[in-house]
Amino acid sequence: MAAQFLFLDSNIPGMGAGYRARVYIPRGTLLFQEAPIILLAQEIPDQDRDERIEDAVRRLPPVQFQQFEQLQTANQFINHRPAAGKFLTNALRCEVNNAHLAGLFLMGSRFNSSCTPNVHQHWNGNFMQFRAMTDIQPNQELCICYNIRKLTLPRAERRVEIEGAGGYECRCSACLHPNHGSDARRASIGEALAIHDPNNLERVPQNFNIIHRAIQALQQEDIHHYRDTLLYDGYLVCLTAGDINNAVLWLERAYEAAVLVVGIEDPQAQRVRMDRLRIQTQPARAGWMKLLPPPI
């Protein structure tokens, strides 16, 4: 279904322009994909970057130029050249062959950010894809997270960093009306993501408990990022423990979570799929340690 039938431009109180769902959108739906009109390395010195942005904007077709001119500039970027200020305010992170880039997307730039986002942006080839991570109800706002690395920070620190990096005050429900224990739950997610070796035999019980607790925290915090990563790590811990039965269950859930956010054809999902096919050919057996299936 075309994007214009799924959502519409809307004025969001306290946030300005944004998107609201026009109809019910099932999770996993590809909302749209978009090529950037400008794509630059993040490490470019300020003066060179500003000049490149100004040059790229001058070469835009008239319609794209008019759309670009409608973008807002955050206060912290008003001392840059006008085009550069708009780019720095609205650009999204892109990971291309392990290079850190920033891209400007005329449609994608209109998403507001939330610390409980319901839309995931994922760079795939030459396009940024935007997918619904949850079931989205009619009239519900569609939000991405500008920087998912901030999601595990405590509320106060998260708000300071978001305002410092983006020049805006986050007014999502998680920041304005945090649930009791939210900071501790988000910290537990960060602790699980910091596990560098889920195959460590000596730390199987500790790693498993940390990962299991973090996935429960994701559910309680209504965060859908990182779910595929942590489920896959849980699979690795079960495999290390020799618990093939539960390893299969964790891997199945990891595959479902990966497909949800990146699509079935994405290399990330295909790698999990191949592991899934391999482990399904192994005979079920009891390992040296019995763990648990993934949380519902």
Image (spheres, grey):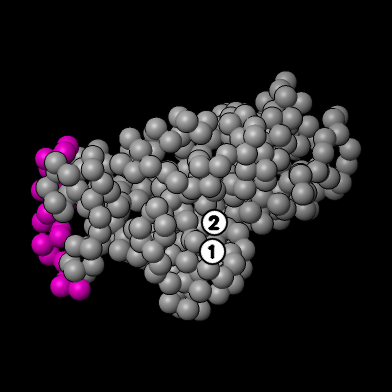
Q: Can residue 274 be seen in this snapshot?
A: no
Instruction: Give residue 34's position: percent from left, percent from top.
Output: 36, 65
Q: Please state if 259 lies on the left or on the right of 35 as rendered.
A: right
SS for tag 1?
Answer: loop
Instruction: Give residue 177's position: percent from left, percent from top.
Output: 56, 42
Mark 1: which amino acid?
Gln
Mark 2: which amino acid?
Asn
Residue lying at the far right in this picture: please name it.
Answer: 286
Q: Please state if 172 lies on the left or on the right of 209 as rendered.
A: left
In the image, residue 16 above or below residue 161: below
**Mark 2 neighbour density, 10 Å: few (under 14) some (14–19) many (20 or more):** many
Determine the image quadrant of residue 4: bottom left
Contact between marks 2 and 1 (CB within 8 A): the answer is yes
| CA distance separating discs 2 and 1 | 10 Å
In the image, residue 46 above or below residue 63: above
Residue lying at the far top in this picture: please name it.
Answer: 202
Q: Which mark is residue 118?
A: 2
Q: Please state if 260 lies on the left or on the right of 286 as rendered.
A: left
Residue 74: in magenta span: no
Q: Dominant secondary structure of the magenta stretch?
A: helix
Instruction: Give residue 213's position: percent from left, percent from top.
Output: 71, 34
**Residue at image location 45% in from the left, 46% down from the top:** 171
Q: Which mark is residue 242?
A: none
Instruction: Give residue 279's position: percent from left, percent from top.
Output: 74, 49
Determine the image quadrant of residue 137: bottom right
SS for tag 2?
Answer: loop
| Viewer-side residue, 171 vs 182 | 171
**Front label number (2 vs 1):** 1
The residue at which mark 1 appears reads as 140
Residue 59: in magenta span: yes
What residue span does the magenta drawing correspond to?
A: 45-63
